[in-house]
Image: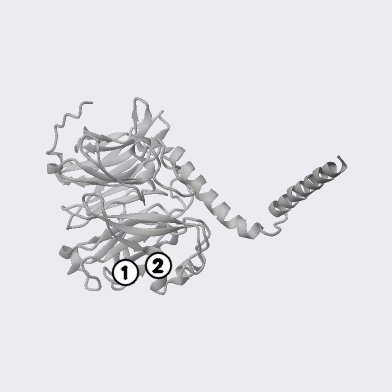
Amino acid sequence: MNDRLAKLFFILGIALLAFIYGIGVGHLRLFPYYWLEKPLSAARQWVNEGMQKNFNNFRYPRRYPQTGTVRSHPQSIQPGVTLVTSMFARDEGYGPEARLLSMDGEVLHRWVVYPEQLFPDPPHQDYVSGLFNHPENYIHGSWLLPNGDLVFNVEYLGLFRIDACSRVIWRLPFRTHHSVFRDEDGQFWVPGLRWRQQPNPEYMHVRPPFVDEVVLKVSPDGQILEEIGLLQALYRSGMESVMAHAVTTLDFTHTNDVEVLSRALAADFPSFSAGDVLVSMRNLGLVFVLDANSHLVKWHMRMPLIHQHDPDFEPGGMISIFDNRADRTPAGTRLGGSRILGVDPASNAWRVVYPTEGAPPFYTELGGKHQRLPNGNRLITESNTGRVFEVDESGKTVWSWINPSIDGQWVAEVLEGTRYPETFADFLPRDCGR
């Protein structure tokens, strides 16, 4: 009996000491606090940011009094149909949809998405497996095809192709996100990421776990044709200094856009070649071009960008960039709002394309997209206000659409507004049995 009591007290004593030392690890930062703290806090932060984004941030305080469509200068509008992606009200509550709008704002067609049904069994086996596989995940990046098929990301869950009746044609179980671009050969380019829990000696300053950003080239039938490592490209291009003071969060790069230089535009960019890849990394304030073959950086720009989005190659040799100028105010009052910049990559000289002098300001802290239209106008997505608007070359607003309000106080953000030719509605009417 005495031996048993002695063993029991010994075990209890060890347990008590372990408990006390555990408290010391957390509060006094004793060994192995520094081994455990960074990976756990980084993973926790990414999870919390993802939860906050998905469950709270699809709605924002209403900033414009009107909703719906305003054709303020009909004669100056670029004809077509407009695809918008957002969270929309439906019978079971708000959920992600893509909607095709006429120039009068009529909903011509809906693609209804149920993220929890796209992958009933989450395909990702990592720390955040299944985190984004729930009803309030959202469409981020889309491309409409003339037959009514839609290729899109459900954020950090995967890339999907559905038909006009929202039936899945294929799924790509890769953590894709933010944007979808289709090149002139019909291949799709999307940002993606791999979750790394082991150190990579090639990545100075980066400690696990971390998000390893990549670009994927995907065939029309959903097969990965090429994978380009973006961190690897930056380090091999001698750009270690960009990361030196930036690795403070798990998502320290935050790639938000990828596109490819076409053969048709290559002559306007003598420093680049057809197939070169244009990339935006929001959290580094970095836009750069990768060589199509070597995957080394050929050009890059940082100043004066603040949380930028959507760089585009444009005719005439200009790279246009949606510069959010996030300033931690609700309406961008500290810096004066967001803007569209035009950059000459030969000199890095830049100018403000919009707003022009006298044009009203606009602002979105997160998100944002712009599209140069065939008639010279520009379609701008002011994401956090739920607004898509078209301006002419003088800066005059000629068309706008604002998401319906939520309870009169809120508005659902619009991740993307894209103008397509009128022929992209030729697949209608389509009886989908709804």
Q: Position of residue 125 (x, y in %)?
A: 44, 48
Q: Earlier in the sequence, mark 1 or mark 2?
A: 2
Q: Amino acid at mark 1?
A: His
Circle on res. 89:
none
Circle on res. 232:
2
Residue depicted at x 26% and y 68%:
292
Residue under numbered circle 1: 295
Q: Quadrant of the C terminus?
A: top left
Q: Is residue 41 left or right of residue 333?
A: right
Gap between marks 1 and 2 measured at Cα = 9 Å
Residue depicted at x 38% and y 45%:
157
User: Element at badge 2?
Assistant: helix
Describe the colour scheme in one phrase: one colour
Q: Position of residue 336 (x, y in %)?
A: 41, 53
In the depicted view, which residue is nearer to us: 61 or 42? 42
Q: Position of residue 383 (x, y in %)?
A: 36, 45
When asked about the image quadrant of residue 77, the answer is top left
Residue 134 visible here: yes
Q: Position of residue 37 (x, y in %)?
A: 61, 55
Residue depicted at x 41% and y 74%:
238
